[in-house]
Image (cartoon, coloured by chain):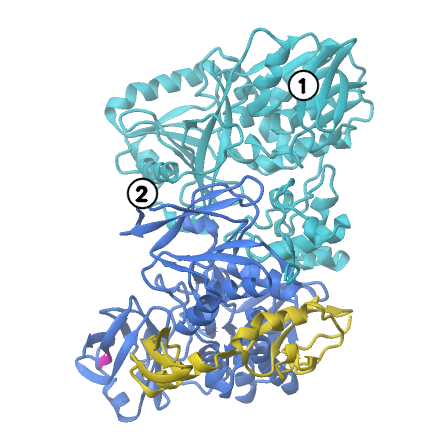
Amino acid sequence: MKQIDLVILGGGPAGLAAAIAAYEAGVRDLVILERDRELGGILNQCIHNGFGLHTFKEELTGPEYAARFAREALTLGIPYKLNTMVLDLSADRVVTAVNRTDGLFQLKAKAVVLAMGCRERPRGALNIPGTRPAGIYTAGTAQRLVNMEGFLPGRRVVILGSGDIGLIMARRMTLEGAKVLCVAELMPYSGGLKRNIVQCLDDFGIPLKLSHTVVDIQGKERVEGITIARVENGKPVPGTEEHFDCDTLLLSCGLLPENELSRSAGVALSPVTGGPLVDESLQTNLPGVFAAGNVLHVHDLVDYVSEEAAAAGRHAAAYILGQKAPAEGEALPVTAVHGVRYTVPTTVHPARLEGSLTLRLRVDGVYRNKVLAVYAGTDCLWRRKRPVLAPGEMETILIKGAALDKLPGCGGLTVTLEEA
Amino acid sequence: MKDVIIIGGGVSGCAAARELSRYQADILLIDKEEDVCCGTSKANSAIVHAGFDAPAGSRMAALNVAGSRKMPALAKELDFAYDQCGSLVVCLSEEDRPALEKLYHNGLANGVEGLRIVEQAELRALEPHIADEAVAALWAPTGGIVCPFGLTYAFAENAARNGVQFQFDTEVEKVEPMEGGWRLTTNRGPLEARCIVNAAGVHADELHNQVSDDTMTIVPRRGDYFLLDHAAGNHVRHTIFQLPGKYGKGVLVTPTVHGNLLIGPTATDIDDKEDTATTAAELEEVRSKAGLAVKDLPLRQTITSFAGLRAHELRHEFFIQEAAPGFVDCAGIESPGLSASPAIGEEVARLVQKILDLPDNPHFDPHRQGILDPKTLSFEERAALVRQYPAYGQIICRCETVTEGEIVDAIHRVPGARSLDGVKRRTRAGMGRCQAGFCSPRVLEILARELELPQEEITKCGGASRLIVGTNKDSL
Amino acid sequence: MEKRELTCIGCPLGCPLVVTMENGAVLSVTGNTCPRGDAYARKEVTAPSRIVTTTVPVRGGELAAVSVKTAGEIPKSRIFDCVRALKAVTVDAPVTIGQVILGDVAGTGVDVIATKGVAAR
């Protein structure tokens, strides 16, 4: 079996950033394994603009953002394999993968970065009753057909879910000649960015129906109609049904980190995010196995994916090169309370912090005029006023300097929302 | 004029075709859909009933037990997925115990082997997730699970291998007697045969009633199901039925041969023989009943829900009979039809043979090899396979790790896959947790390439079920 | 006097803005909580503009289509003119990222450029 320093599972934005960072930190014996036919991951089909404002201070499209990282990886000469599917990952970091040219192969890695991304919640997981005809797509599948293959999956469209992909696809389908009849959203608020509501729906007069869901699908062979209804307390309200004649239903109802490989390897997963539980170095419970990007928790902006994955790459490099302090010693739990849905990481080793601690989190509802705060035991380490917090937006907390001195012996960190 | 036309490519029609292919005859199987296995056979509980349930002395009971007995050897001969995992009928209350005893004795009368009533402690050991209320269960070690698609395709492919022809998208409009046989009027012109096998599922009564005054009535009985992810597949090890009783008639919870967990069905008699829409009320019924016999069901792991129709004849019996001279019914095949199918096929063939007195087919080959699943190979075997056929190194469906090699094989079989669902039922591509989100554009591409059709013409399941309706900007 | 209602896109707050106008001139902006909201509203009611992204088919490429964008913002009212102008366009592989696919799209003075490279097959 071939020995290798670092294997990166996935060549999307997370995998590329992790590989580049690990290379720059001195790892030379590495490979990116990508299952699709090109590097860049899902960004290749996200042809709209709005990427990279944080990283590059300019507004790029998805393919342009991906190309910057892919070009850098290529310039550095980082090896990668396309059309390569990882079939198995073991707890001792043996990666089994397959492709046409190398066949079935195994790599024994010193470290692994999980960067497999996420997938969309399918119809089945939503329990929408009705028939099961052609014309029901997740927004991402439709996006691939339209943006990568040039095919129109439908002409009269209803979209369920107002996450950003659903909103983006409302505009895309409209621009390519389809009629989008409405976007229905189960929650009383949209999970998408304001900018996308304005520029993808309002610009084209597409109605957004909050607190609505699909209660029936008609059509035996191809979708012929969709019935939506208003929702109260999670249940459709009888008498509020509204019918649309359409040939397509697009679903944009949430993303799920893709952790089947992680799970079978024995990586402990968070029931909240569906991603691995990690420490401050983004290392999972398995030594040498790191995670970053949407496989860890679903991000709102790709810039943060790149940032997080670069950190995972650096930590993996430190692990491989023996520069990492041993994991022994105190591990503090990080607890999310009072409106904070989760944090990444969920444990912190104070002895291993290198001058700063980054915490990423999401809240569980829309909050206005609150204070986001971090406590070490009862000591407040960090607090900031937030005029608005929404589940659709990821929050990042950076704690530096003297505040970190309060960590040893504090018993644990708590991240909370407080009254302003 | 054909010797035999089999109307209906469900599991019964395909089993009959396979058994009839033992004879030298000109046999045609027709179906109104674009493939075999498109009706009841594609949406059911996917189990092999041991045979304790059907009324002792009934045709149903005899064929069920006979079919179930044939299943292990047949699974080897025809290479389909089958697992004799055993079944448990769980009794949830002491006051229902007489019903459990009655079922046990019915099973004994039907000749079911190995039946035993297990008490609480043993039941818990057999099934750790059994409901706390469970007091005892009827254990049938010969009960099993089967891939209903795999079984149907195995019959169909073996029949084709032995000379049976298949014609799809062909719907029978009229059946009339003619000199020396029968004339069928179909949407694709007339067809004639010396002998007709009516295996038309929920529509079998409509054909039967055209040739016989002894009318039958088939009521489509719809059942909704939930299919759960592999992650939930080990929640139970046996097929778990709930004994009808104090808590009503329950739903079953069973592992599938592919490692999923299946829960259902409801039973609602409806009018429309094509109405396989799930309803909110029935899905809710499955949800509420599923937990009666099995606790801690991880329903959050649901990857899809679906509904199927059982061809319920009002008298609740299988009708395998010569309804008119040369017209053989294979009707009323509701549950346990899948379990009984090997015996049903033989019974139909016996009746047809009595009518036509056909010579043996000297080239009959009883064996069929299924689509090679690289997951079942050792590392070395799989590596060798990929070296020889690189398409087995290209994963198309990530969730079920289905390769391009398997999909291409499925398309070029006879009868072969022509649609996304045809590929799905044969290979499981698109059957996994993402429900074809990632792989459908790729499968579309492969189907178009292999069938030499534009991608726009590839359908989900035949007819008007096109996946692509045009190209970008074509209407601007 | 005319009032227009907008939602600010500057941040997640999404302030509901009311712009009062007369004869095409902005008299006032209310509802904003920061100067960005004021600037956005004034621009949006007088000269709204957007970057348009779409794809065009590629002949002889490793991929069937290439993603493109307007190199800068074009008037919002011209979005569909831009897309329609691209309906007739097919490019030959290889395509390089940044390559002009259609100059001065629909008379806007803005070029449409490739946002991805596509190698020849």
Q: Quadrant of residue A298 in the image?
A: bottom left
Q: Secondary structure at mark 2?
A: loop
Q: For the point 57% across and 44% down, which residue is it?
A: A222
A109 or A43: nearer the eye?
A43
Task: Count all numbered tags in the image, as a single digit.
Answer: 2
**Chain C visual colour:** yellow
Residue A262 position, x and y percent, is: 47, 64
Give the quadrant of the N terminus of chain A: bottom right
Q: Quadrant of residue A328 in the image?
A: bottom left
Q: Examine the rendering and report whether any part of residue B83 can be seen.
A: no
Q: Tell me: A188 left or right of B145.
A: left
Q: For the point 60% across and 42% down, which residue is it?
A: B425
**Chain A visual colour:** blue
Identify the disc placed on residue A199: none
Any magenta on residue C64?
no
Q: Please state the chain letter of the residue tagged with numbered disc 2 in the rendered image.
A: A
Q: Pointer 2: what residue? A: A238
Q: Tell me: C49 left or right of B459.
A: left
Any magenta on residue A374?
yes
Q: Pointer 1: what residue? A: B174
Report crowding for label 1: few under 14, some 14 to 19, many 20 or more residues within 10 A (C-alpha): some
Q: Amino acid at mark 2?
A: Pro
Q: Is residue A164 above or below residue B69?
A: below
* Main secondary-structure element of the magenta-colored stretch: strand
Q: Is residue A322 above or below residue A225?
A: below
Give the quadrant of the C terminus of chain A: bottom left
- Chain colored cyan: B
Residue C28 position, x and y percent, is: 32, 84
Provide the residue span drawn in magenta.
Answer: A371-375
Please tell me if label 2 and label 1 are on a single chain.
no
B421 or A25: nearer the eye?
B421
Q: Secondary structure at mark 1?
A: strand
